[in-house]
Image (tube, rainbow, N blue to C red):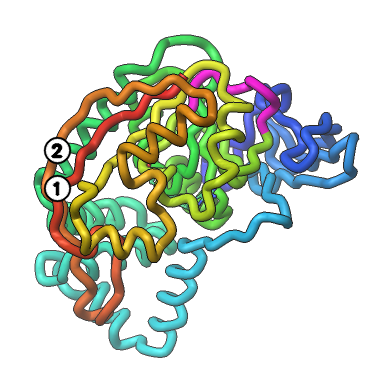
Amino acid sequence: MNEWGGVGMDEQLVDLLVCPVCHGALVWRTQVRAGGRIEEGEARCHGCGATYPVHEGIGLFLTPDLSRHDLWEEVESRLAAYLRQHPEVERTLLATPLEGLSPADRWFRARILEERGAFAEAQRAEELALADLYTREWLACYRAQLAYVTEHLSPAEGPVVDLASGRGGLVEELARRSSRPIVATDFSPRVLRAARRRFAFLGLARRMSFLACDARRTPFRDQAVGTMTTNLGLANIEQPEGLLPELRRVVAGELLAICHFFPEEDEANAAAIRRLGLATFLYERPAVAAFRGAGFEVELANVRRGQARPTPEGVLLAGAGIDALPVAETELTWCTLIAR
Ligand SMILES: C[S@@+](CC[C@H](N)C(=O)[O-])C[C@H]1O[C@@H](n2cnc3c(N)ncnc32)[C@H](O)[C@@H]1O
């Protein structure tokens, strides 16, 4: 058990992992372990000699060749720098009753509180933020997909690997409602560290492992993953050309991907989506075609529609935004894309 009351990487995962660069076998050296969990250690590739540390219970399997636009790192360090220069804004942000703050300011307050380990207060701020950041339909569609994925999971053995887990919206749902081990992955070590602390606080970390890896170059051996999930993860992956061949390589069973698709005729959002380079997974037709092209069979389940509006910017933190999309009000089609 570590200082956060959480646990390290499940030792059973070792059998599923290879070098993300050359897929060579890994030779493990464990320095600190407890209860079948690795806290500190190192894996060395027998093939190419690359090394991958396990630090504070998180396996770090990032490769140097893929560029990484880590928004968590950017937002948190920009926020910290801004608040250092404007301590009066931080004081007001933390002292104002939550109801008196704008939705985005509530969300940023939640981030500051979480960073300080004030998880219960952070959760309250976040809940109040979400209720006003998103439309009621958006939240209903989102929750319906989380519920669908957790209900649809088979009770099969073996871990569920969640891709682009971020702060762990889906991971939390899986931990609460399924008995399977969960592997949360993201290319941002920062967000994984924060998620792990929060889940340890919530008493949910026991069945979880955390691996920092790029979804386009994962450390899983061929066909090692029985069930993979992702919650709005695919559409956040920049330069996703290698993504689906990689997922086809590692997924033996099924991939359940929560997606929302934009209407093709919505020009205002289309221009922003093109600028961000995220068109493949934000439109139904290219997304389905990309999966089929990579050799998957595809089914769209639990299809729902709901209005979405741009998330409002901060007021105290003037101009600070939450979601880049949508840039104009639109109707999104939500579904769980099942790929086998
Ligand atoms: C909006 S979050 C998705 C929400 C999250 N799945 C949940 O359930 O709360 C998108 C995540 O994708 C991650 N991401 C973006 N590109 C990635 C990549 N190439 N590989 C792995 N993760 C990536 C980001 O760091 C971010 O945490």
In the rendered image, which quarter is residue 152 located in? top left
Q: Position of residue 232 (x, y in %)?
A: 36, 43
The reply to whether dot 1 and dot 2 touch (C-beta < 8 Å) is yes
Mark number, residue 305: 2
State the SS at label 1: strand
The answer to whether residue 11 shows anywhere in this view is no
Residue 336, position in %: x, y? 31, 29
Q: Nearer the viewer, residue 260 or 158?
A: 260
Q: Is residue 224 visible?
A: yes
In the image: residue 222, left or right of residue 151: right
Tally the marks: 2
Residue 245 in the image: above or below residue 65: above
For ligand 1, tell me if the residue under mark 2 lies within 8 Å: no
Kindly identify the amino acid type of the residue bearing the numbered disc 2: Arg
> Residue at 70% across / 35% down in the picture?
38
**What's the mark number on residue 180?**
none
Q: Residue at x 55, y 54 (%)?
A: 188
267 falls in the magenta region: no
> What residue range appears in magenta?
220-228
Disc sitting over residue 331 in the figure? 1
Q: Which residue is drawn at 36% across and 58% down?
A: 118
